[in-house]
Amino acid sequence: MKISYNWLKAYANVDLTSQEVADLLTDCGLEVELVETYQSCKGGLQGLVIGKVLTCEKHPDADRLSLTTVDVGAENPLHIVCGASNVRAGQHVVVATVGTELHPLEGEAFKIKKSKIRGQDSEGMICAEDEIGLGNSHDGIMVFADNPPVGTPAADYFGVENDTVFEIGLTPNRSDATSHIGVASDLVALLHTRKNQHITLNYPDIQDFNPKLTQSPILVEVEDAEACPRYTSLYIKGIKVAPSPAWLQNRLKAIGVRPINNVVDATQYVLFEMGQPLHAFDADKIVGNKVIVKKVAENTPFTTLDGVERKLSKDDLMICNAQQPMCIAGVFGGEDSGVKDATQNIFLESAYFQPVGIRKTAKNHALKTDASFRYERGCDPNITVYAAKRAAMLIQSIAGGEIAQIADFYPNPIAKKEVRLRYKQLQQIVGKSIDNEIIKNVLAALEMEILNETADELLLAIPTNKVDVTREIDVIEEFLRIYGYNQIEIPEKMTYSLSFLPQNPFIAVKETISNYLTDNGFHETMNNSLTKAEYSENFDFMDKTQTVSLLNPLSRDLADMRKTLLFSGLENIIHNINHGTTDLKLYEFGTVYRKNAEVNRNEDVTKRFSEKEFLGIFLSGKRQAESWNEKQAEVDFYYLKNLIINLLKRVNVSINTLPSNMVEATKTLNNVLQYGVGEDVFVSIGQVNRKLLKTFDIKQAIFYAEIDCVVLAKLTKGKKTVYEELNKFPEVSRDLALLIDKQVTYKDLEDLAFKTERKYLKSMNLFDVYEGNNLEENKKSYAIRLILCDKEKTLTNNEINAVMDKIIAAFESKLGAKLR
């Protein structure tokens, strides 16, 4: 939110530097994030002066140039070569002296230098209005009919306004500070409390408000008083729409608001002045001379000011005429509701709408306006009449017209909240003993009225603009903001208690896994647990009954709690691919969320919802960076499988001991290898299917593995790394070529071998697979290597042959294998 210092001083006559103001505001919770300078004309017309052309002659070597001497109030006149056709002796003109930087309307800024033009000296420039940013005309130089004094700075003559603008990072709870008067109120309270400067807060004067018309021709009817507790309106007849005066345009431009016309600018001015949104309707376009505040049917089409047709919700509060909606209440106007150049009569709205309804409507339609920004935080319901009168008087002063009597619908006035403040409680929270009179002075500076006082406590009436102050602790927070956190001394002695939480052993396991993956070239990602609603809606494999959706999402992109790590990982991958990185190794520890549809809504929340942590691993592209002495290879399923096996070995989990299952395809992966523990799938390894990749516009293969961290925690619980002495005796390798049925897997062979020989068989490896010619139908050939050893002695040939015979016999009898 931007605050103009010049505008601020209209309500608080302070004499402080901009930095002092910034420090004070930041210290009271209105953090000033940026201080910048504003000039109504870029460059502030610095270096430009009023001059008088003394002589004007044709350039001897150029027909379109003139040689002039110009008096700018210096000791000697300037010699200037001018290309304007309308330059004449005796004219009063704008002169840019040497060293001046000009900021034209179009093009970049440039500096005036002393130069020679066609052999003649030129010591400045006589300017046209577009060359100094004051207008669009380039027909010739600016000539003044009123002959202003020579040497007058152009900035003084044109009344260039210089201002300081504060960019404030406003927190959502500070609805009372969404205006210049709100910020000025805090500034006055700060000066009164901390610097003992008794400055009065100057509110705009509306004593001269004098309606000439007895009754408005527009009838107002509020059908939904719950969504619109107060609706104030008035009618102004016979206005003339025109550009706003310079002072009003400068006020709005300083805070980044584009002026439109005098009527709209006046409503904008009051909005930023006192925080009350207003809307001016063209009264002659209100069908039936009737304004109805109500909700309309679901999916009613409505075209807003930006020309976009939107489908309304049944919960959207609308400002309607006798036939159709005209405006989304508190959010955005309709296409035909605004004030145009031909408008002669206006209907001015100053209302109070329920914040929750405005917030939902604004988010539903993805509309964020200055009005909704204030309404959804909570405006002051008791300033609507004051704001309407202020705006009406301002409009009348710059656009003319006659004002009708105010109509005010306010059936249930909103009273000030009453809060009790205990002196002892305040001092305990603050951590300092503060005199009661100081406390009362600060509260008075915050316009909190003392209704009753005892020796121990105060009964306070809270201003209705402070919607977040409802409890004693809120009052204490308000007091501290103004009194100053920095005035609370740090005590010489501080006491605190130490708490010891049991260490989660799985943290060490996660750290080991992270280190292993990082050492192997992986990068860890961290993604938001909130994800896009379209993932649940557009993918038929997502069970929508399990989706945990937010009641009031910030946007469609942050509407659901994620049910898988896969989508966020694919978002990471396409982001990297789009930025030129195609070789990717990523992993993420993340939580997924599901709703247990079968559980009653009244059940405990821990039963209605479940969350579970997973490890997701993504591979794509080349295995390693390009090198002259190493051939590049693409990552594949077996590369990922081997990585997972070694990773789990690193945390003492042998995946080979777990039951496995090969699935041709799941809803997201192809050729999926799954390992289970009980009824749970512990590990899934596969290739992301092309249909899913296409939705993310990913054209390269992606391999994905997912590990259930809950199961992993159980498998690693209590396990420690055990080290043993290296075997002193030699290993023996034996190779077998087996002819087996196609349905027999390598894991079947491996499991049977280790079950048959537990003592001497150390490891087993498949190094060749053959299917094709010269083999029986439905047969395949496996070449395997077995490693045998004994920890206590060197194996003899007889022992080795005995082991091999036993294993071969088991292969033949149990799996139907034959030696080739």
Image (spheres, rainbow, N blue to C red):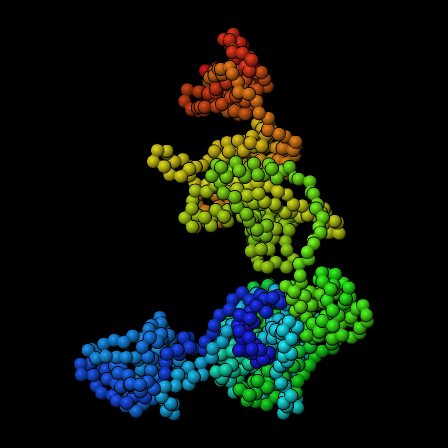
Could you tell me if residue 677 is visible in this image? no
| Relative image position of residue 191 (x, y in whole percent) | 62, 74
Q: Quadrant of residue 92?
A: bottom left
Give the answer, above or below, for where 687 lies relative to 757: below
| Relative image position of residue 101 (x, y in whole percent) | 35, 74
Q: Relative to residue 792, is residue 130 drawn left or right?
A: left
Residue farthest to the front, as pictured: 492
Could you tell me if residue 795 is visible in this image? yes
Residue farthest to the top, as pictured: 798
Query: 133 and 35: which one is in front?
Result: 35
Residue in the image at 68% along x and 70% along y: 466
Quadrant location of the C terminus in the rendered image: top left
Quadrant location of the N terminus in the rendered image: bottom right
Give the answer, above or below, for where 257 lies relative to 536: below
| Relative image position of residue 758 (x, y in whole percent) | 59, 17
Residue in the image at 55% along x and 67% along y: 32
Give the answer, above or below, for where 563 lies relative to 287: above
Query: 793 and 410: which one is in front?
Result: 793
The number of discs equals 0
Residue in the image at 49% along x and 79% along y: 250
Q: Relative to residue 531, is residue 699 drawn left or right?
A: left
| Relative image position of residue 50 (x, y in whole percent) | 36, 85
Q: Relative to residue 151, is residue 408 drawn left or right?
A: right
Residue in the image at 74% along x and 72% along y: 437
Q: Quadrant of residue 815?
A: top right
